[in-house]
């Protein structure tokens, strides 16, 4: 170390360090999710095979979500009335249906989100830019996990990663959220959409 470096070294301690993002507490994240009523935004989906889909998502808590995929895909996923309906644009068959409770998305669509619930959160960390929460249904861990990614100031949900029971991952990256608007009930009506398509 030369003399100039030795003389300046103590002053380096006085320089401001880069801001380190603090982890957002689970209670604050639960409050944020419970405060969401309706959300509308564009999304980009990175599928398990590396392909990318885009579209628009509508959320109405509790229990309702609609993924409208952009052309040329034209697929549609609706959650409503406790069911998830998956409409395949290439098929004229009725949608595949599953109970919403059997999907990790149910964790953020629940009427009362409580991330502090025992055994629900299996990972909670800060990665330098965001807080990441890995959660599963404690009653049905075999249904897979969802990792929620939040930014702070203000708290905002930016993306989620769903890992299914086979280990396949699907990442959904959200655009700018439009919150609190009015959404038509028909957006979340699987039966009405089935009739409309003539399935």
Image (cartoon, helix red, strand yellow):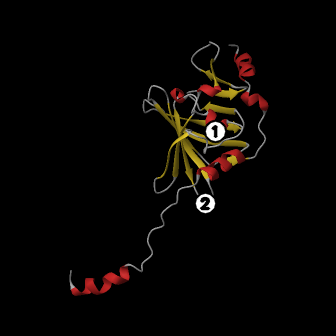
Q: Visible in this render: residue 76?
A: no
- x, y percent for residue 52: 48, 34
- The answer to whether residue 113 is left or right of residue 146 is right
Report helix, strand or loop for mark 2: loop
- x, y percent for residue 34: 70, 45
Establish if 3 lies above or below 92. below
The residue identified by callout 1 is 108
The residue identified by callout 2 is 153
* Numbered-mark total: 2
**Residue ID at (51%, 30%):** 144
Q: Mark 2 or mark 1: name the one nearer the start of the chain.
A: 1
Report helix, strand or loop for mark 1: helix
Furthest residue in direction front, as rendered: 118
Taking depth in this image into account, of 143 and 198 the one nearest to the observer is 143
Establish if 189 lies above or below 157. above
Other residues around mark 1 within 10 Å, as few (<14) / some (14–19) / many (≥20): many
Give the position of the N terminus as an image quadrant: bottom left
- The answer for how far apart the CA atoms under marks 2 and 1 are is 21 Å
- x, y percent for residue 97: 63, 19
**Residue ID at (73%, 42%):** 38
Tag of residue 23: none
> Is there CB contact under 8 Å for labels 2 and 1?
no
- Name the quadrant containing residue 25: bottom right
- x, y percent for residue 160: 54, 41
Dot in front, 2 or 1: 1
Q: Visible in this render: residue 5?
A: yes
- The answer to whether residue 176 is left or right of residue 38 is left
């Amino acid at each position: 170390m030369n003399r100039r470096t030795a003389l300046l070294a103590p002053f380096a301690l006085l320089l401001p360090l880069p801001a380190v993002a603090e982890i957002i507490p689970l209670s604050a994240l639960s409050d944020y999710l419970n405060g969401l009523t309706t959300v509308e935004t564009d999304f980009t989906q990175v599928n398990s095979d590396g392909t990318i889909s885009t579209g628009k998502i509508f959320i109405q808590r509790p229990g309702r979500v609609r993924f409208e995929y952009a052309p040329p895909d034209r697929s549609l996923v609706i959650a409503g009335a406790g069911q998830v309906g998956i409409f395949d644009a290439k098929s004229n068959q009725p949608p595949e249906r599953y109970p919403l409770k059997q999907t990790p998305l149910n964790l953020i669509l629940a009427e009362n989100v409580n991330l502090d619930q025992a055994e629900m959160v299996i990972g909670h960390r800060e990665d330098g830019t965001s807080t990441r929460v890995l959660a599963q249904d404690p009653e049905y861990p075999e249904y897979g996990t969802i990792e929620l990614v939040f930014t702070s100031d203000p708290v905002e949900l930016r993306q989620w990663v769903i890992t299914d029971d086979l280990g396949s991952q699907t990442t959904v990256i959200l655009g700018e959220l439009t919150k609190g608007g009015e959404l038509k009930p028909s957006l979340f009506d699987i039966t009405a959409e089935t009739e409309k398509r003539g399935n």
